[in-house]
Image (cartoon, helix red, strand yellow):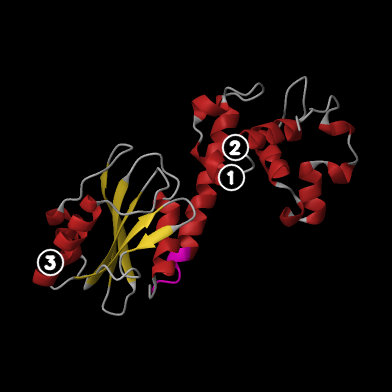
């Protein structure tokens, strides 16, 4: 079904149907994704309201806010009614939401399962269009000491520097670590290079007395755990 924009402006609506007034009267949970984005946009164009414009933007990403978060200024400004300032407002708000989710995951501090590790790592690398390699450094009681990006690559891969990984671990007095990288393709199957790297880092960890607890392959909604699959 094609979405048909409204020709009437938001000011002509009943007060409790306007996004800002609705937020004040009913609270944030009462607003749809489109209405929240409309508040960020502030205004639409001569031909459509801010809500209409927000719905059209969401429709382009099938209503997926994670997909919307991947769009940059060039992609957003292709929509009529979106200039650089509005594009930056949308990008900033989605990034703040992403960082809030990261903070909530880190507040738990201890990681005792692959699912908890995924909650920490997915906001960092789950929706990237290129591959990155990260390490979560843990204390003896599995508390998160830090998480570090070790390397960034292209669409097809990245490299992990063993010396850099363990240098940081020693600096933090870490006794354990969780490795992670993302697959932008969405394919969770580990490559032979992934397996070889995992074995190499496990051996190095044994020598340095820093245990490699797991290696996660992260996609937007799922993960593959080497430890869960018995490959550690």
Horizontal placement of 217 versus 86: left or right? left
Q: Which residues are magenta?
A: 105-110
- Magenta segment: does it hold 161? no
Q: Where is the N terminus found, in terms of image quarters?
A: top right
Badge number at residue 10: none
Q: Earlier in the sequence, mark 1 or mark 3?
A: 1
**Secondary element at tag 2:** loop
16 left or right of 172?
Answer: right
Name the residue located 60 percent from the left edge and 37 percent from the top edge.
Answer: 61
Q: Mark 2 vs mark 3: which is more N-terminal? A: 2
> Circle 3 is placed at which residue position?
203
Q: Quadrant of residue 36?
A: top right
Q: Position of residue 75 (x, y in %)?
A: 53, 27
Q: Are marks 2 and 1 in contact (CB under 8 Å)?
A: yes
Residue 215: x, y in percent? 29, 62
Alpha carbons under labels 1 and 3: distance apart: 40 Å
Q: Relative to 40, is 208 above or below?
A: below
Disc 3 packing (10 Å; few <14; some 14–19; many ≥20): some
- Residues packed near mark 2 inside 10 Å, few (<14), some (14 to 19) or many (20 plus): some
Q: Is residue 138 above or below residue 135?
A: below
Q: Is residue 19 above or below residue 41?
A: below
Q: Secondary structure at mark 3?
A: helix
| Majority SS type along the magenta span | loop
Q: Secondary structure at mark 1?
A: helix
Query: Residue 61 shows which numbered tag?
Result: 2
Q: Which residue is mark 1?
A: 65
In the image, taking residue 125 as reference, residue 13 lies left or right, namely right
The reply to whether residue 204 is visible in this rendering is yes
> Nearer the observer, disc 2 or disc 1?
2
Distance between mark 2 and mark 3 Cα atoms: 43 Å
Camera-side mark, 1 or 3: 3
Q: Position of residue 204 (x, y in %)?
A: 11, 64
């Amino acid at each position: 079904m094609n979405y048909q924009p409204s020709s009437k402006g938001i000011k002509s609506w009943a007060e409790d149907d306007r996004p800002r007034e609705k937020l004040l009267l009913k609270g944030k949970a009462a607003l749809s994704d489109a209405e929240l984005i409309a508040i960020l946009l502030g205004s639409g164009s001569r031909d459509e309201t801010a809500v209409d414009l927000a719905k059209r933007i969401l429709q382009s990403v099938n209503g997926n806010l994670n997909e919307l978060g991947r769009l940059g200024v060039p992609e957003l400004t292709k929509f009529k009614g979106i200039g650089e300032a509005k594009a930056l407002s949308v990008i900033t708000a989605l990034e703040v939401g992403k960082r809030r989710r990261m903070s909530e995951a880190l507040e738990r501090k201890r990681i005792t399962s692959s699912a908890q590790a995924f909650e920490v790592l997915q906001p960092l690398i789950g929706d990237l269009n290129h591959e990155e390699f990260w390490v979560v450094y843990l204390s003896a009681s599995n508390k998160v000491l830090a998480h570090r990006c070790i390397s960034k690559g292209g669409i097809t891969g990245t490299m992990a520097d063993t010396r850099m990984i363990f240098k940081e671990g020693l600096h933090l007095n870490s006794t354990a670590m969780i490795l992670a990288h993302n697959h932008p393709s969405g394919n969770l199957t580990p490559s032979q290079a992934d397996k070889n790297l995992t074995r190499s880092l496990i051996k190095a960890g044994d020598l340095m007395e820093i245990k490699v607890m797991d290696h996660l392959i992260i996609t937007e909604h799922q993960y593959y755990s080497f430890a869960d699959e018995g490959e550690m």
